[in-house]
């Protein structure tokens, strides 16, 4: 049976009690009850912060300060509090429906704020104690002889009762006295300190600045200094401290003693390191993440003269299929295995591997000769991926595409280098994948240009930057204009007129081709209505539009709004989009055909179509690709192209279809195509694409 969830009051009481017990392990119940009301306000603030979508750092800092105020200044209390906070977030607040990952993230943020508040409060108290100790020490020198005993007693009380570690050393830095707090910091024995010189307590991470400040103090150049310094305890563990050393002079002003005050910052430092690690490493693979990698890359590209770098940008081929077929858990295991293999590839000095996110990884190498190094690194990565990965009894083949950028430091920024590697990786992927490519500045420029056009497309449609030109369709038997093909153009604000060959593929890739195609259809149908239906208008239809469920509905509405009969519209779709298509794909075309709309099979002959399959396609026009009419333009005409056109015409007649040819450029070519039996032609011989007014002039010319 599942119990009812705790009320907010019950949850707060339990959290406060658990926190009090964690701070006083093994203490009698009376002590826990006495501490509980002192922690209650802070516990309430922590609980509310964990519930908030964006945790309040103020509540965490207040809780840290409350620990110090409750005389729980031992650094271990921070760790116990964080454990209690994690448990409360997972066990108590988790019942309220919150995502465990979100609760953990909130707990980390609140815990960091708590540690900061604890450190600030402890520092404030330490400063107060330091001032008291200094005043007591100076007072002890200035009091009259008859008050010496009293002042020494007062100093001893402050000295022994302080939570801050204190030692007193002679002018030669020999440690003479230590208090209890200092003894506890070094493992509970004062033998590690008494009688030793401070200069003997070195640590491998000590900098020259630490000992320069100490020498200046001993020499009387300065009165005090403050540094962060590490010590090695007798058991071999590291003690990190904030150390303040002051010089005490005698009545004649000569250096007499050194007074050292030490704050233990080990727990806080470890917490900061933990938070730093979590912020700079990938939670799944343990590799450096984008943040840390970008820091390293910025250093590499800004290195000194003579330094170079090489970057491999890896994306797994077909990783989405693994997630879709085997599940995300299997995908995560595959990513972990890939990460391990990549880590094993980058073990030389100056090499590192990171995960940027998803199935994208990067490998960086630096040094004076990275030309061969980055090539070798890419080879090692490809070889490492070649061995199948076994997931749940299945052997998965791992493939990857790599983009490589190599060059001297100081010429490009990190963002530019990463973008170039990303572009190059996609170039390798579009070339078939499972390969690596080196960056090419010209290819990068083309890719950036395409990207800029892609991002500008949506606004271009909204701002009315597209316009339509019309190219006449001429009847070969009498040379009259029977229709026109609508061809969309883009008047770019900076680049001028952009042809469809540059932006139509981008629109298809982004899905914008559907609203753009709808707009072209509306404009073309409206123009045909202005021609009073005298000319049939041809509009290109992309495969993406064919898959749009609203195609038939939109076409019917557009025709009705314009008052144009369906027979005045012809939709052109490429041969490659229809040949071999399923009945589900062909259904909307059959519906449009039944309405009276003509369907033309565009670019016919460019694919390897099953000619027998033409019978099942709802088309009424075969539009022969210009590549076949090109041979007829020569003198003498290419016999192969002539035979192909003859064969297409015979096939069309058998199936009851008409034939339109593209790319007609000469009168002789037009006459030969007429003799071969073609019905309609278009090309520069008749007119280039232009505004609708120019087509109107052609129609008037025919009438005359």
Image: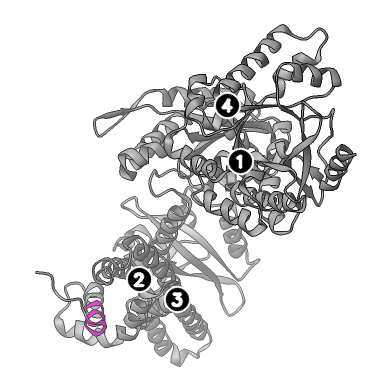
For disc 4, the marked residue is 656
- The CA distance from mark 1 to mark 3 is 55 Å
- The CA distance from mark 4 to mark 3 is 76 Å
Mark 3: give few (<14), some (14-19) or many (20+) Cα within 10 Å.
Answer: some
Q: Which residue is painted at 73% across and 59% down in the image?
A: 463
Please state which of the two labelled residues, at mark 4 or mark 2, is closer to the viewer: 4
For disc 3, the marked residue is 56
Q: Is residue 628 above or below residue 293?
A: above
Q: Position of residue 34 (x, y in %)?
A: 22, 87
- Whether residue 533 is visible here, answered yes or no, is yes
Q: Secondary structure at mark 1?
A: loop
- The CA distance from mark 2 to mark 1 is 83 Å
Tags 1 and 3 touching, CB below 8 Å: no
| Colour mode of the rendering | one colour
For disc 2, the marked residue is 181
Q: Is residue 555 left or right of residue 50?
A: right
- The CA distance from mark 4 to mark 1 is 22 Å
Q: Which residue is painted at 37% across and 85% down in the image?
A: 153
Q: Is residue 236 above or below residue 325?
A: below
Q: Is residue 511 left or right of residue 53?
A: right
| Numbered range of the magenta stretch | 7-15
- Whether residue 306 is visible here, answered yes or no, is no
Of pointers 1 and 3, the one earlier in the residue sequence? 3
Please state which of the two labelled residues, at mark 2 or mark 1, is closer to the viewer: 1
For disc 1, the marked residue is 541
């Amino acid at each position: 049976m599942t119990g009812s969830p705790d009320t907010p009051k019950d949850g707060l009481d339990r959290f406060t009690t658990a926190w009090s017990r964690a701070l006083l392990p093994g203490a009698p119940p009376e002590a826990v009850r006495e501490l509980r009301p002192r922690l209650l306000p802070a516990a309430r603030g922590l609980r509310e912060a964990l519930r908030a979508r964006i945790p309040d750092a103020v509540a965490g800092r207040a809780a840290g300060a409350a620990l110090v105020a409750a005389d729980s200044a031992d650094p271990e209390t921070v760790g116990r509090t964080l454990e209690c906070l994690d448990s409360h977030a997972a066990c108590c607040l988790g019942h309220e429906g919150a995502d465990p990952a979100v609760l953990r993230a909130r707990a980390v943020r609140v815990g960091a704020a708590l540690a900061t508040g604890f450190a600030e409060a402890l520092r404030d108290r330490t400063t107060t104690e330091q001032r008291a100790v200094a005043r007591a020490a100076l007072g002890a020198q200035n009091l009259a002889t008859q008050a010496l005993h009293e002042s020494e007693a007062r100093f001893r009380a402050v000295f022994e009762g302080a939570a801050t570690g204190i030692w007193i050393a002679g002018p030669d830095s020999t440690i003479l006295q230590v208090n209890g707090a200092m003894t506890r910091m070094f493992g509970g024995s004062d033998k590690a300190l008494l009688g030793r010189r401070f200069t003997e307590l070195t640590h491998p991470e000590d900098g020259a600045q630490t000992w320069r400040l100490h020498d200046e103090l001993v020499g009387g150049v300065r009165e005090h200094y403050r540094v962060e310094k590490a010590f090695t305890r007798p058991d071999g563990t590291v003690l990190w401290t904030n150390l303040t050393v002051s010089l005490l002079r005698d009545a004649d002003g000569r250096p007499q003693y050194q007074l050292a005050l030490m704050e233990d910052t080990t727990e806080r430092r470890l917490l900061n390191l933990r938070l730093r690690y979590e912020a700079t490493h990938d939670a799944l693979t343990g590799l450096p993440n984008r943040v840390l990698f970008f820091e390293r890359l910025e250093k590499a590209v800004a290195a000194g003269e003579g330094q170079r770098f090489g970057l491999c940008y890896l994306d797994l081929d077909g990783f989405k299929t693994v997630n879709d077929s085997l599940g995300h858990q299997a995908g995560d295991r595959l990513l972990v295995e890939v990460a391990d293999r990549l880590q094993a590839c980058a073990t030389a000095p100056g090499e590192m591997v990171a995960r940027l996110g998803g199935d994208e990884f990067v490998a960086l190498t630096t040094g004076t000769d990275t030309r061969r190094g980055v090539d070798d690194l890419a080879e090692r990565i490809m070889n490492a991926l070649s061995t199948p990965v076994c997931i749940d009894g299945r052997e998965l083949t791992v493939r990857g595409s790599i983009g490589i950028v190599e060059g001297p430091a100081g010429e490009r920024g990190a963002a530019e280098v990463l973008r170039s590697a990303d572009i190059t990786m996609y170039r390798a992927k579009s070339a078939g994948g499972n390969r690596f490519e080196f960056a090419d500045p010209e290819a990068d420029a083309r890719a950036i240009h395409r990207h800029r056009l892609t991002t500008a497309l949506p606004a271009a449609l909204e701002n009315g930057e597209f316009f339509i030109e019309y190219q006449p369709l001429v009847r070969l038997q009498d040379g009259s204009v029977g229709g026109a093909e609508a061809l969309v153009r883009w008047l770019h604000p900076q680049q001028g007129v952009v042809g469809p060959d540059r932006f139509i593929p981008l629109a298809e890739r982004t899905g914008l081709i559907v609203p753009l195609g709808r707009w072209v259809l509306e404009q073309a149908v409206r123009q045909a209505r202005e021609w009073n239906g005298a000319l049939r208008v041809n509009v290109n239809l992309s495969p993406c539009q064919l898959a749009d469920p609203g195609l038939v509905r939109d076409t019917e509405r557009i025709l009705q709004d314009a008052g144009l009969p369906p027979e005045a519209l012809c939709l052109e779709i490429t041969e490659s989009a229809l040949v071999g298509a399923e009945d589900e794909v062909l259904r909307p075309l059959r519906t449009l055909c039944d309405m009276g709309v003509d369907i033309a099979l565009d670019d016919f002959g460019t694919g390897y179509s099953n000619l027998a399959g033409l019978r099942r396609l709802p088309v009424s026009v075969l539009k022969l690709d210009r590549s076949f009419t090109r041979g007829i333009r020569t003198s003498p005409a290419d016999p192969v192209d002539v035979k192909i056109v003859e064969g297409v015409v015979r096939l069309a007649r058998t199936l009851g279809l008409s034939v339109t040819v593209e790319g007609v450029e000469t009168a002789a070519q037009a006459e030969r195509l007429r003799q071969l039996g073609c019905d309609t032609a278009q090309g520069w011989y008749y007119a280039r694409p232009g505004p609708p007014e120019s087509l109107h002039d052609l129609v008037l010319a025919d009438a005359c």
